[in-house]
Amino acid sequence: MSTQANSQQAKQSLAPVLPSMRERVYAYIDSCGMSGATDDEIEVALGMKHQTASARRKDLWDASRISWDGRKRKTRSGCLANVWITKAAAVRAFAKGSGRGNDPSSARA
């Protein structure tokens, strides 16, 4: 069986729990507000494997629910990683005047 077939089979077996996992990742990123979260921070906070956390974060990116705000932070291994924010957090910060000077409608997609 090919790697792609294995990946598809794994995704199908997880189908019933993917929405709740995705929402856990979303809720964590949103709870970070404009500080945002890296994939590494998501993994640690939620106790998820890298592959699981990054795949669910990518689902949120594909659904346009989160944005990369242009910042990077160091991971536990010292590598730089993108910082993700929810679009809802950006809107809240902009409405309060505490955004980073960015109009949330221009958040990177």
Image (cartoon, rainbow, N blue to C red):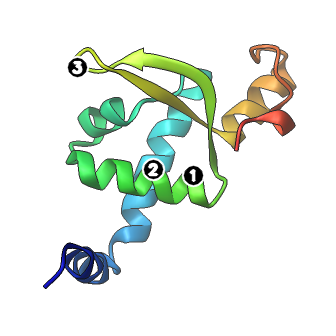
> Looking at the rendering, which quadrant does residue 45 occupy?
top left
SS label for mark 3:
loop
- Whether 76 is drawn above or below 26: the answer is above
Residue found at the very far left of the displayed protein: 1
Answer few, some or many: residues within 10 Å of disc 1's Cα (few below 14, many 20 plus, some between 14 and 19): some
Using residue 41 as the reference point, say whether residue 61 is left or right of it: right
Using residue 103 as the reference point, say whether residue 35 is left or right of it: left
Q: The disc labelled 3 sits on which kind of residue? A: Arg
Residue occupying the point 86% across, 27% down: 103
Q: Position of residue 19 (x, y in %)?
A: 44, 69
Q: The disc labelled 2 sits on which kind of residue? A: Arg
Q: Which mark is residue 76?
A: 3
Q: Quadrant of the C terminus?
A: top right
Residue occupying the point 52% across, 33% down: 31
Answer few, some or many: residues within 10 Å of disc 3's Cα (few below 14, many 20 plus, some between 14 and 19): few
Q: The disc labelled 1 sits on which kind of residue? A: Trp
Q: Which mark is residue 61?
A: 1
Q: Which mark is residue 103?
A: none
